Image (cartoon, rainbow, N blue to C red):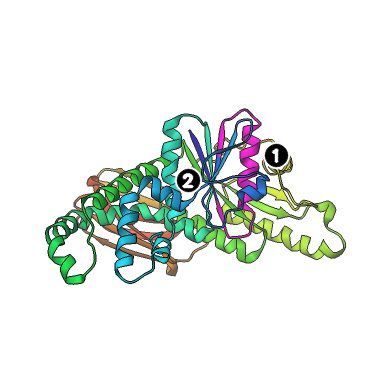
Amino acid sequence: MRIILFTGKGGVGKTSLSAATAVACARRGIRTIVLSTDAAHSLADVLQAKIGPEPVTVEENLTAQEINVHAELRHHWGAIRGYLKKFLTSQGYQEVMAEELAVMPGMEDLFALIKLLEIRDEGLHDLAIIDCAPTGATLQLLGMADVLQWYMEKFYDIEKKIALAIKPIAEKLIKAPMPDKGVYSSIEKIYERLMEVRDLLTDPKISSIRLVTNPEKIVIQETQRAYTYISLFGFPVDAVLANRVIPDKAMRGYLKDWGKLQKKYMAGIERAFAPLPILQAPLFPTEMLGPSALAKMAEAAYDSRNPEDILWQGRPFELNGEDGKYKMSVMAPGVTKKDIDLWAKKGELIIKVGDFQRNLILPGCLDGHVVSKAEYKDDVFHVTFEKGL
């Protein structure tokens, strides 16, 4: 099953382009499902269809679904939800408030990505399109797998054994429930599924992320940062979609100067994201709502390309080695040397780019190796490992 994720700054039109891509693919005979993970769902509005937490057929070959975090909690992770609710209630929170607080930030995206495994295993769809939350939330989610892996490998087993051993005494002392075996079992299941999702989303033969932007200075800068952070975590990006580009025929009167400015910014987008393909969706004279309008949007954006194809193949994160020397490279456009920090310790490499940090559990082949060189050149961060010097 092919997977395409759309992300971008809030308000750039990623939901419209996600839905447009889904409609175009479905009309090409591809069994397509489009999922919304944004807490403020607008997929139903864009498709002009009634969509809820269960899959709904919009038209032939096209299914849509808006992930409901409460429904997914009840269905899949009842033990964790029950524990959090019970703990919060014991601390004096009213039941309704405890119910809401039991939903941690980012869970919509987490459940949507885990949902991909269910959709893949069902075998009913050829393509899954994810309309992700705005950039910041998406990046935190994509980095969650590494953070959780680090925690599970370093501390989880010890913490679990201690917690279960002292549970009867601790509950009396703190006057609050402690997690039981069922809660820990659910955590382990989430971890296993999340690792599966990470493997799925970092496979460039299956998955792609498409960055949606507008030809505006601030939006472009955020999109550059997003590309760098996504590359840091090894997720393949296959295209940038510039939305609401003023067409030449509209560059007159009130829009003339704005159109000239957009042309300048479009040239900047081409430079900033090369060699990624840059697709353009024009500013239409009316709202693009409903499948027919969205099909026109997709036709304009993709031109002669097939929207379901992998539009560009390249590894944003690579580790290669020969003769005992290993080289790691990370795509990092739009940053400077001072934005990048690096720490290394036994079996672990920590890379910080801007506000995001990746804790890499290094593969066994790097045992006994140390960082001998690190440099930032031509939008790529290079790290060299050699046998202990």
Q: Residue at x 58, y 56 (%)?
A: 272
Q: Residue at x 47, y 66 (%)?
A: 336
Judge whether 276 appears above or below 356 on screen.
above
Q: Give 353 or 131, whichever is nearer the viewer.
A: 131
Q: How many marks?
A: 2
Q: Please tell me whether mark 1 sits on a helix, a strand or a loop.
A: loop
Picture coordinates of residue 271 (x, y %)?
61, 55
Q: Is residue 308 visible?
A: yes
Residue 236 circle label: 2
In the rendered structure, which segment of residues is drawn in magenta?
7-33
Q: Which residue is mark 1?
A: 303
Picture coordinates of residue 22 (x, y %)?
61, 39
Picture coordinates of residue 227 (x, y %)?
51, 55
Q: Residue at x 33, y 66 (%)?
A: 89
Q: Give 124 or 359, whichever is nearer the viewer.
A: 124
Residue 247 is left or right of residue 217, and the answer is right
Residue 179 is left or right of residue 204, and the answer is left
| Kind of residue at disc 1 | Asp
Residue 221 circle label: none
Q: Residue at x 41, y 40 (%)?
A: 200
Judge whether 176 appears above or below 27 on screen.
below
Q: Please tell me whether mark 2 sits on a helix, a strand or a loop.
A: loop
* Magenta-colored stretch includes residue 20: yes
Q: Residue furthest front?
A: 95
For the residues marked 2 and 1, what is the alpha-carbon distance in whole angstroms? 22 Å
The quarter in which the C terminus is drawn is bottom left
* Magenta-colored stretch includes residue 13: yes
